Amino acid sequence: MHVSGCTSMLSIKDIVPAAQNNITTQFILLDKGRVATEGQSKTCLALVADETAAVHFQFWGKRGSIEKVGEFTMTYVETPNISEMRWVPDPNNSKKYVHEAVVSPYSRIFPPML
C-alpha cells in the first residue's frame, strides 16, 4: 500500500511524532484490528511494515489517501516497531521529538505469530 501526503517517500524508520502528520510511505499490511465507529467516521488500527521498521497505522481518518500498489508481497521487518518507542522533546529543538527508549521490541497490540 502507498500512503500519500507529501512529495518525498519516507521509510517507516524515519517517521517521528510531529504536529505535521502528512507523509508519503509504502508498506505492507501485516495485521488489522476491528473497525470502530467514532461519530460519522469509521476507524481501524493496523500493524504495517516496510524493510526498515513497523508501526501502528490508523486507517479511515479524515485526511490522506491510500492506494494499493504492486502485489501482495514485500520485504518487511516487524522490529523495531516505532509505535513501541518512547519519544521525548528534543532538548535542542522543542518543535521536534527524539527517540528515548524502546518500550517493547514488538507490537503489544498485534503480537508476532510464532
Image (spheres, grey):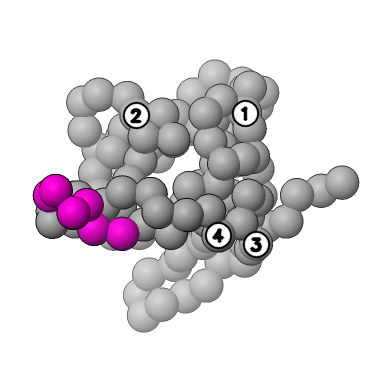
Q: For this rendering, which residue is in front, 106 or 69?
A: 106
Instruction: Name the element at disc 2.
Output: strand
Q: Identify the mark nearer the N-term, 3 or 2.
A: 2
Q: Which mark is residue 108?
A: 3
When the figure is inspected, residue 16 is found, relative to residue 111, above or below; the finding is above
Tell me whether the residue at label 3 lies in contact with that at label 4, contact meaning CB atoms closer than 8 angstroms: yes
How many numbered marks have been drawn onto this rendered protein structure? 4
The residue sitting at 53% across, 36% down in the picture is: 53
- Residue 67 placement (x, y as % from top left): 43, 34
Where does the magenta region start and end? 88-93
Q: Which mark is residue 103?
A: 4
Give the Cα separation between the discs numbered 3 and 4. Answer: 9 Å
Which amino acid does the dot numbered 3 rest on?
A: Arg
Which amino acid does the dot numbered 2 rest on?
A: Leu
Which amino acid does the dot numbered 1 rest on?
A: Tyr
The residue sitting at 18% across, 54% down in the picture is: 91
**Quarter of the rendering containing residue 3:** top left
The residue where tag 1 is placed is 76
The crowd level at tag 1 (other Cα within 10 Å; few <14, some 14-19, many 20+) is some
The residue where tag 2 is placed is 10
Tell me whether the residue at label 3 lies in contact with that at label 2, contact meaning CB atoms closer than 8 angstroms: no
**Quarter of the rendering containing residue 75:** top right
Q: Which callout, 3 or 4, points to the residue nearer the camera?
A: 4
Query: With 16 as the anchor, is 111 left or right in this view?
Result: right
Give the Cα separation between the discs numbered 3 and 2. Answer: 24 Å
